[in-house]
Image (cartoon, rainbow, N blue to C red):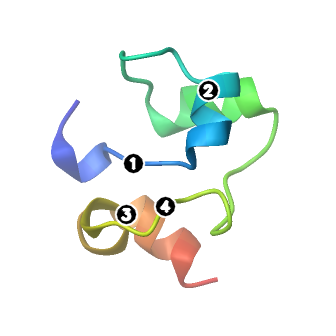
Amino acid sequence: MPAKKGFMVLNELWEKFGVGKNHLCMDCFEKRLNRKLTKDDLTKCFLNENVNPDTIKILQT
């Protein structure tokens, strides 16, 4: 997965809806979560705040 599409969510969410040490695209994670991600779901990190345009947009809402 390209870094510009990577994202990081809170550990509790990943433990419940993620796939362990593997990766999921944001769309697939949202399908497992059964809703869109919100800024409260995302961790504060360089990737979410500066690299992924989708997470940047979420964080600005």
Name the quarter where the N terminus is drawn: top left
Q: Which residue is label 4 attached to? A: 43
Mark 3 burial class by Cα count in 10 Å: few <14, some 14-19, many 20+: many
Q: Which mark is residue 7?
A: 1
Q: On the rendered image, what quadrant is the C terminus found in?
A: bottom right
Q: Local crowd at mark 2 within 10 Å, few (<14), some, or many (≥20)? A: few
Q: Is residue 25 above or below residue 4?
A: above
Q: Quadrant of residue 32?
A: top right
Please state the horizontal and vertical placement of residue 49, each as a whole percent of the image: 35, 73
Q: Which residue is mark 2?
A: 15
Q: CA distance from mark 1 to mark 2?
A: 15 Å
Type of the residue with mark 2 = Glu
Whole-angstrom CA distance, mark 3 to mark 4, is 7 Å
Of 61 and 49, the residue lying toward us: 49
Helix, strand, or loop for circle 2?
helix
Q: Which residue is mark 3?
A: 48
Q: Are marks 1 and 2 in contact (CB under 8 Å)?
A: no
Residue 60's x, y, as percent?
54, 84
Q: Position of residue 20 (x, y in %)?
A: 47, 15
Q: Kindly check if marks 3 and 4 are in contact, taking CB atoms under 8 A apart as contact.
A: yes
Report if the CB atoms under discs 1 and 3 are less than 8 Å apart. Answer: yes
User: Residue 53 lies in what quarter of the image?
Assistant: bottom left
Q: Residue at x 56, y 41 (%)?
A: 11
Element type where label 3 sits in the image: helix
Q: Three-letter amino acid code at disc 4?
A: Thr
First reached walking from the N terminus: tag 4 or tag 1 = 1
Q: CA distance from mark 4 to mark 1?
A: 9 Å
- In space, the residues marked 1 and 3 are separated at their CA atoms by 6 Å
